[in-house]
Amino acid sequence: MNRAGAALALALAGLAAAAVGAPRSGSSYLAPDLKALQDDDFRNPGLLWVDRGRELWSEVPGKGAKACAGCHDAAAMRGVAARYPAYDRTARRVVNLEQRINLCRTGRQHAAPLAYESRDLVSLTAFVSRQSLGMPVQVTVDGPARASFERGRAAYHQRIGQLDLACADCHERSEGRRLHGETISQGQINGFPVYRQLWDGAASTHRMFAWCETAVRAQPRAPGSQDYVDLELYVRWRGQGLPVEAPAVRK
C-alpha cells in the first residue's frame, strides 16, 4: 500500500471509530446460553455446515472437474475469509467469499456455479471461513474497491421501506437499546455464515440483509446482488479488527 492509500485507510478507520466507537462483536450481546452454544465445538449446530464443506472440499464436483483440494490445502485458506469482500481483477469488481468460490468453480474447476444460499455454497463458505477463526477482519476499501465501499456506505445510511429506517438507525443510533426483548447490536458480521435458530439453519450475510429489509417493510434485493456485496464490504469495514467467529450462533 502506498502512502496515499495508507493515509486513506487511517482516515477511514477514524471515521469508523467515530461512528460506532470500538467495534463490538455480536457474540458479546448474546445471552449466556447462546454464547456457550456458539463456543462449544461439540454443540455449535453451525459446525454441521462446516463438516459438509470439508467433505465438498475434497469432492470432485463433476466429470472432467477437479476438487478444491486439488489446488489448495485447507490450511492455505487461513486468512482468506478475513480479507473478503475484495476486488477481483478477473471479475473487475468487488466480490464476496461466496462469489470467489463460484469463480473458482467455473474458471478453474470446470464445474457449474452453486446457487446462492444453497446448502452446499453456505457449507463451503463456512468451511473456508472456519480456517480463519480468531483472525482479525481486515478488508481493503481503497484503490479499485473504493467505489464499491462508497456505494455500500451510502446504502447503509439510506432510509428505506415503510418504516423509513436505515441500517445506521438501528446499529449505530439505537445500538444497546432493547427491541422485542433483545439488545440491538452493532450489526457486525464477523461471525458469518451464521447458524440462526429462527431459520433452523446456517445462512449468509445476504440472507440477513434481506431479512432486515423485509423487517422494515422494504423490498429485499437478491442475495448475491452487487448492492448487497457493496453493503457487505462496508459492514465488514465497520468491524475491522474483530476476530472471525464463523459459524456464529444467533437466535
Image (cartoon, rainbow, N blue to C red):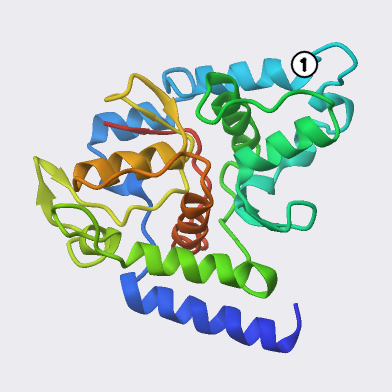
Q: Say which residue label 1 marks.
A: 61
State which quarter of the image contains the C terminus.
top left
Name the kind of residue labelled 1 in the image. Pro
Left or right, 180 with respect to 217, comes to left
Please give the name of the residue rendered at 20% of the width and 67% of the height, measured from the top-left corner: 173
Secondary structure, mark 1, is loop
- Which image quarter: residue 159? bottom left
User: Looking at the rendering, which quadrant does residue 140 occupy?
Assistant: bottom right
Q: Is residue 41 left or right of residue 38?
A: right
Q: Position of residue 21 (x, y in %)?
A: 33, 72
Tell which of 161 and 153 is nearer to you.
161
- Point out the residue furthest to the top here: 63
Quadrant (top left, top right, bottom left, bottom right) of the N terminus: bottom right
Across and down, in percent, residue 181 comes to: 9, 40
**Picture coordinates of residue 2, whole percent (x, y):** 76, 83
The local crowd at label 1, few if under 14, some if 14 to 19, many if 20 or more residues have their Cα within 10 Å, is some
Q: Relative to 51, does residue 135 appear above or below in the rendering?
A: below
Q: Is residue 11 left or right of residue 156?
A: right
Q: Residue at x 24, y 58 (%)?
A: 160
Q: Residue 199, position in %: x, y?
A: 32, 23
